[in-house]
Image: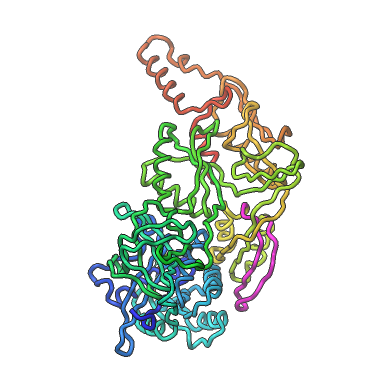
């Protein structure tokens, strides 16, 4: 297809504003998916995506659309909407010339609307503003057309109104895309350069890599090279998605499609990397490539210790499909053998954990998530700490922690509540703007550690659900942090150690000591539960002693009954872990580590 007839675009929106539903309507409207085969969220192929109603992996689909008698090719690139996957969103955007900025006509602009708009603007995309869900009785198209026009600096009359549900306005939107999105421009005679914007593992076909060709072309059976590693592979198959994979004779300038090389691991075909011809290599990679960087770390342990090999195999398998997943073996005195796993963020953690449990039938415990700290000692050594147990014991000169730049959007009546919350989370207000008299945008710098757990929930509950929130990494800052240990009868329980701000150390210590006092059954002797910073105890509870003699209840006589009781007691012991001489039921660990 000549580049003049190609349009590459994406749809960007705040979560739930209807991106996937609109994509469905476009597939139908262009005849790519027959009516009878249509199912909701056609492009969200993973079970977990369909159940949660979110898009995790990007998808690209090719649709024909005729305008003035000539058939154009529209390549729609669906993007994941969540901040954990911002890097993937930004690579998807870099594969496009235009973006449909979709806003729910009953909600207006939200935090991710802005975050995605800024990403699109950084990639120099032409923005097409669109209000969705105009079929809703609660829709206020005039009001929000004004808001949206104000944001991007156009006339409110230029804001299209559609309904992904009924299909109203969708053909007009497709026309508008052909009219306004510039066609791709590239050098057809130059050495091939194609950008990888997604890479997925398929059990039968190995890794399927999605690319956008910028210069030159790629054809089947040719040898290609990855520019970041110089690794070469043979192109076994090349094609387009419409909406199922269709092999083709090659991809030229501006085209979007998939490659199959037979590699089995997505890390050999990474998002952001540039594909070139091995015979005639390009000299300069397309910009922007970086390795995904884990932001949140947690220990993952099988509840049943004998499942450790299963967990290792499950992680190895998941890694084939998730280049951002990193892990290494770790042991905990309390939890046994497991892994320290790095994640892009909390949603990524939840998804990985859920997939491990679902796809391998494992029951897992995860330790308190933490971020990565840099600890500088008096003697000048610097230690990267992703696990509280690695926290150095030498004299500490300084510690830095990662921070994020965040945007919060909310009705202006909640400004006070939001400020209060951000204050308790050690935030610094960086700026504030009114989008309209009743809607405000607040910008905060916050420590990542303060938002990974429950910040979003706290924000929602303080604003009756009206606030939205987005963030991006913004370097690191020095902070007064300490490691708090939890001790049972003088022995540290490694799984409960945490790195926290000095002002919050006491609260953490009291909370854990109280929880454990309730969760750990009485023993034959008194058990002190302590929280300590180094050798200094900051909180203490005591589990009082009992004499637990089950046989005493039996009043002699019935031997078989006695035996049963003894056996029961033994069985109970199996699920106990010993911390020093204290028996701790497995459930106590799980309950103490759970977030609620
Ligand atoms: P995404 O998170 O942006 O992909 O949003 P979805 O497409 O998953 O839609 C979120 C919710 O909004 C779903 O319950 C959809 O059924 C609903 N929805 C999407 N578009 C429309 C629309 O045009 N009208 C109405 N009434 N509901 C819609
Ligand atoms: Mg979606």
Assign the magenta stretch its main secondary structure: strand
**Outermost residue to the bottom:** 68
Callout count: 0
Residue 396, placed above or below residue 189: above
Is residue 552 at all visible to an observer of this figure?
A: yes
**Outermost residue to the left:** 36
**Outermost residue to the front:** 279
The residue shown at (44%, 84%) is 180
The image shows residue 64 at horizontal and vertical percentages of: 31, 78
Quadrant of the image for the N terminus?
bottom left
**Outermost residue to the top:** 557
Left or right relative to 527: residue 301: left
Is residue 136 at all visible to an observer of this figure?
A: no
Q: Which residues are magenta?
A: 426-449
The image shows residue 391 at horizontal and vertical percentages of: 65, 40
The image shows residue 51 at horizontal and vertical percentages of: 37, 57
Between 381 and 148, the residue placed more toward the observer is 381
Residue 274, placed above or below residue 532: below
Task: Look at the image and say whether residue 442 sits in the magenta stretch.
Answer: yes
């Amino acid at each position: 297809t000549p580049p003049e007839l190609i349009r590459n675009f994406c749809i960007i929106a705040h979560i739930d504003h209807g991106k996937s539903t609109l994509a469905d309507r476009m597939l139908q409207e262009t005849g790519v998916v027959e009516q009878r085969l249509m199912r909701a969220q056609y492009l969200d192929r993973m079970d977990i995506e369909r159940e949660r109603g979110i898009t995790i992996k990007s998808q690209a689909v090719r649709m024909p659309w005729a305008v003035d008698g000539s058939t154009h090719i529209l390549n729609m690139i669906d993007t994941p909407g969540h901040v954990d996957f911002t890097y993937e969103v930004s690579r998807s955007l870099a594969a496009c010339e235009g973006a449909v900025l979709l806003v729910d006509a009953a909600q207006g602009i939200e935090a991710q609307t802005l975050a995605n708009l800024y990403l699109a603007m950084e990639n120099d995309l032409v923005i097409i503003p669109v209000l969705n869900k105009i079929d809703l009785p609660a829709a206020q198209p005039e009001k929000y057309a004004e808001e949206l026009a104000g944001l991007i600096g156009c006339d409110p009359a230029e804001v299209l109104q559609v309904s992904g549900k009924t299909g109203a306005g969708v053909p007009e939107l497709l026309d508008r895309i052909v009219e306004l999105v510039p066609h791709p421009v590239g050098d057809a005679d130059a050495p091939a350069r194609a950008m990888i914007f997604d890479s997925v593992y398929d059990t039968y076909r190995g890794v399927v890599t999605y690319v956008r060709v910028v210069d030159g072309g790629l054809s089947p059976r040719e040898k290609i090279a990855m520019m970041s590693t110089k690794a070469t592979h043979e192109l076994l198959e090349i094609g387009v998605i419409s909406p199922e994979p269709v092999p083709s004779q090659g991809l030229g300038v501006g085209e979007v499609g998939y490659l199959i090389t037979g590699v089995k691991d997505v890390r050999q075909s990474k998002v952001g990397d540039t594909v070139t011809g091995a015979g005639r290599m390009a000299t300069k990679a397309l910009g922007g490539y970086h390795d995904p960087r884990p932001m949140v770390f947690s220990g993952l342990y099988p509840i049943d210790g004998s499942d450790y090999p299963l967990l290792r195999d499950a992680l190895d398998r998941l890694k084939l499909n998730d280049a951002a997943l990193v892990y290494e073996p770790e042991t905990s005195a309390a939890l046994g053998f497991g892994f320290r796993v790095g994640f892009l963020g909390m949603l990524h953690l939840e998804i990985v954990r859920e997939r491990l449990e679902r796809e391998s039938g494992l029951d897992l415990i995860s330790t308190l998530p933490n971020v990565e700290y840099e600890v500088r000692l008096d003697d000048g050594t610097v230690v990267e700490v992703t696990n509280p147990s690695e926290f150095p014991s030498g004299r500490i000169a300084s510690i830095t922690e990662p921070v994020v730049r965040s945007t919060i959007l909310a009705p202006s009546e909640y400004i006070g509540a939001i400020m209060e919350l951000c204050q308790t989370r050690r935030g610094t207000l960086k700026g504030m703007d009114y989008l309209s008299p009743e809607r405000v945008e607040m910008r905060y710098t916050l420590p990542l550690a303060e938002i990974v757990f429950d910040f979003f929930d706290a924000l929602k509950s303080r604003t009756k659900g009206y606030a939205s929130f987005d963030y991006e990494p913004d370097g690191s800052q020095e902070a007064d942090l300490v490691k708090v240990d939890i001790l049972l009868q003088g022995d540290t329980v490694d799984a409960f150690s945490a790195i926290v701000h000095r002002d919050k150390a006491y609260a953490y210590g009291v909370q854990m000591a109280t929880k454990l006092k309730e969760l750990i059954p009485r023993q034959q002797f008194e058990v002190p539960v302590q929280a300590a910073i180094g050798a200094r105890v900051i909180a203490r509870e005591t589990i009082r002693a009992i004499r637990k003699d089950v046989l005493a209840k039996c009043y002699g006589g019935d031997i078989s009954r006695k035996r049963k009781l003894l056996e029961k007691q033994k069985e109970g012991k199996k699920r106990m872990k010993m911390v020093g001489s204290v028996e701790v039921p497995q459930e106590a660990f799980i309950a103490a580590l759970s977030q609620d």
